[in-house]
Image: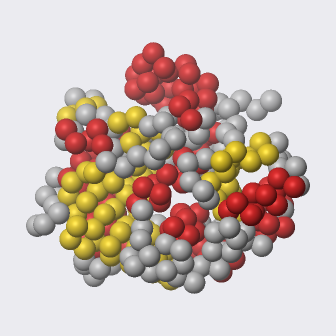
């Protein structure tokens, strides 16, 4: 059996962060995570798809949203006709939370920043019932092709996919909502790929942190006044999370708001790390530890743009 690779500095860092829970944390990181799906409710009602899949002896457990189900005993859901026909998407359950917390409305114009491969793009489109508009932006050519393929596969008529570097954007104050699921060190993916941490280092974390700060501030610029942004990563490193959110708050016209999902256990953001103190409202940010919901690791924070 393949063993999960943990760099020594990763072990040291998370032993300190997790304290008495460290061994439980590492134990869950070394397990394969459960499969879960998000139903494309633009094509089929979730209850109907669930009924059809159960007729095929699939075991489905309802999660925190009518579109979300956990699978048990299904080896290759991606080989099914339902998946090929765009009736559902394979998506890890913790990664579903940020789009749900953004809560886009039918009338909204929404930016899905760094959008590929399009998992959260599908979520946004379905949460808006196919109305409004989602602008899905991706810089990387290959990843953009995947994004465009998925937009077509899922029949997302209210989505416009654009290949561009978000940092080159000049327009300000045009979006009601923004979802920034930022490029990160991908620590949370270790439950999906046992070698996910092969290239991990604190230097990588710090490099990603600088990019994330630029992206987050750019996204804030694109928001209308009183508009809302959800910033998220599949990392638990404070450098990529609380420190990034702190930089947005210190920009002068942003505040954190509460954003939790019923039926999913979360923990508050850190108020200090490595001698650095964060804003007292950082407790409104959310940390998702793998041992709490048998999920991947995740972080998100909901930020409202205030008057300048």
> Which of the 4 quarters of the picture holds residue 72?
top right
Q: Going by the picture, which residue comes out furthest to the left?
A: 308
Quadrant (top left/top right/bottom left/bottom right) for the C terminus = bottom left
Q: Residue 260's spot in the image, x, y percent?
A: 41, 46
Q: Is residue 115 left or right of residue 39?
A: left
Decide if residue 196 is in sight here. Answer: yes
How far across and down, in percent of the image, does residue 33 sit?
Answer: 67, 39
Q: Splitting the image into 4 quarters, where does residue 133 fall? A: bottom left
Q: Residue furthest top?
A: 20
Residue at (17, 63) in percent of width and height: 306
Q: Residue at x 70, y 60 (%)?
A: 47
Determine the residue positioned at 75% across, 62% down: 49
Q: Position of residue 19 (x, y in %)?
A: 42, 19
In the figure, residue 113 lies in which quadrant? bottom left
Q: Is residue 156 above or below residue 292?
A: below
User: Residue at the location (42% across, 68% down)?
Assistant: 104
């Amino acid at each position: 059996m393949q063993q999960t690779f943990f760099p020594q500095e990763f072990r040291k860092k998370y032993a300190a962060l997790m304290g008495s829970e460290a061994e439980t944390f590492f134990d869950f990181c070394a397990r394969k995570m459960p499969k879960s799906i998000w139903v494309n409710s633009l094509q089929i009602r979730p209850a109907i798809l669930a009924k059809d899949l159960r007729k095929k002896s699939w075991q489905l457990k309802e999660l925190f949203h009518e579109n979300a189900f956990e699978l048990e005993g299904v080896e290759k859901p991606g080989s099914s006709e339902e998946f090929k026909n765009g009736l559902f998407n394979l998506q890890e359950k913790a990664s579903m939370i940020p789009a749900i917390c953004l809560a886009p409305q039918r009338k909204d114009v929404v930016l899905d920043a760094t959008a590929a491969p399009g998992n959260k793009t599908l979520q946004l489109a379905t949460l808006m019932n196919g109305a409004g508009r989602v602008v899905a932006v991706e810089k990387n050519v290959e990843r953009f092709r995947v994004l465009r393929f998925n937009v077509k596969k899922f029949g997302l008529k209210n989505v416009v996919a654009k290949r561009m570097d978000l940092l080159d954007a000049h327009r300000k104050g045009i979006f009601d909502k923004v979802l920034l699921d930022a490029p990160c060190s991908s620590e949370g993916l270790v439950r999906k790929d046992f070698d996910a941490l092969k290239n991990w280092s604190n230097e990588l974390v710090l490099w990603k942190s600088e990019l994330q700060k630029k992206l987050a501030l750019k996204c804030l610029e694109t928001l209308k006044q009183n508009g809302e942004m959800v910033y998220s990563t599949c990392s638990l490193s404070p450098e990529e999370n609380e420190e990034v959110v702190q930089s947005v708050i210190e920009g002068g016209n942003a505040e954190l708001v509460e954003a939790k999902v019923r039926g999913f256990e979360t923990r508050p953001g850190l108020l200090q790390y490595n001698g650095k103190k964060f804003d007292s409202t950082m407790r409104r940010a959310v940390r998702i530890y793998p041992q709490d919901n048998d999920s991947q690791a995740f972080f998100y924070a909901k930020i409202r743009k205030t008057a300048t």
